[in-house]
Amino acid sequence: EIAFLEGMTVVYKSSIDLFFYVVGSAQENELMLMSVLNCLFDSLSHILRKNVERRSLLENMEGVFLVVDEIIDGGVILESDPQQVLQKVNYRADENPLTEQSVAQVLQSAKEQIKWSILK
């Protein structure tokens, strides 16, 4: 679904008791926004083992944050392929929730990115 609201382009998708929104400027390509939305939904569906509902999402928020961080950074689209996103967050269907090591890796990567952006 696509909507235009107050000069913004909004694409959205619903699943059971959740709504997922991707918002861009009025000039943003709707197909690109839909690609980001589908990547987000497919990645979360994989992490939540096809159980995309509110309770599962809340129980796995760290995975949700990691997925969003891999798809978008500062409003810039980084990735729109769910397989690449899942590979980057090191999340497999047969694993239990994220390990401390993978969270630590993401935090270390974020620290390095911040350091390099400050040094520029």
Image (tube, rainbow, N blue to C red):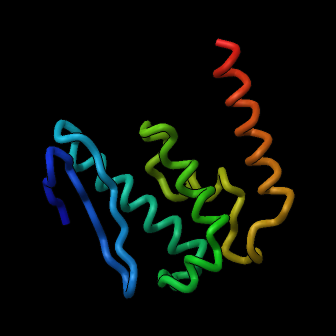
Outermost residue on the right side: it is 101
Q: Is residue 34 above or below residue 13?
A: above
Q: Residue at x 42, y 39 (%)?
A: 75
Quadrant including the C terminus: top right
Q: Is residue 68 above or below residue 78?
A: below
Q: Residue at x 33, y 62 (%)?
A: 21
Residue 12 found in image quarter: bottom left
Residue 58 found in image quarter: bottom right
> Is residue 44 shown left or right of residue 105?
left
Q: Residue at x 76, y 74 (%)?
A: 95
Q: Position of residue 112 (x, y in %)?
A: 75, 31
> Is residue 19 shown left or right of residue 4?
right
Q: Position of residue 110 (x, y in %)?
A: 70, 39
Q: Nearer the viewer, residue 6 or 83?
A: 6
Q: Residue at x 55, y 77 (%)?
A: 57
> Is residue 104 shown left or right of residue 54?
right
Quadrant including the N terminus: bottom left
Q: Position of residue 7 (x, y in %)?
A: 15, 44
How many numbered marks appear? 0
> Is residue 72 shown left or right of residue 30?
right
Q: Position of residue 93 (x, y in %)?
A: 67, 74
Outermost residue on the top side: it is 120
Q: Nearer the viewer, residue 37 or 4?
A: 4
Q: Is residue 84 above or below residue 95?
A: above
Q: Is residue 50 above or below residue 69?
A: below
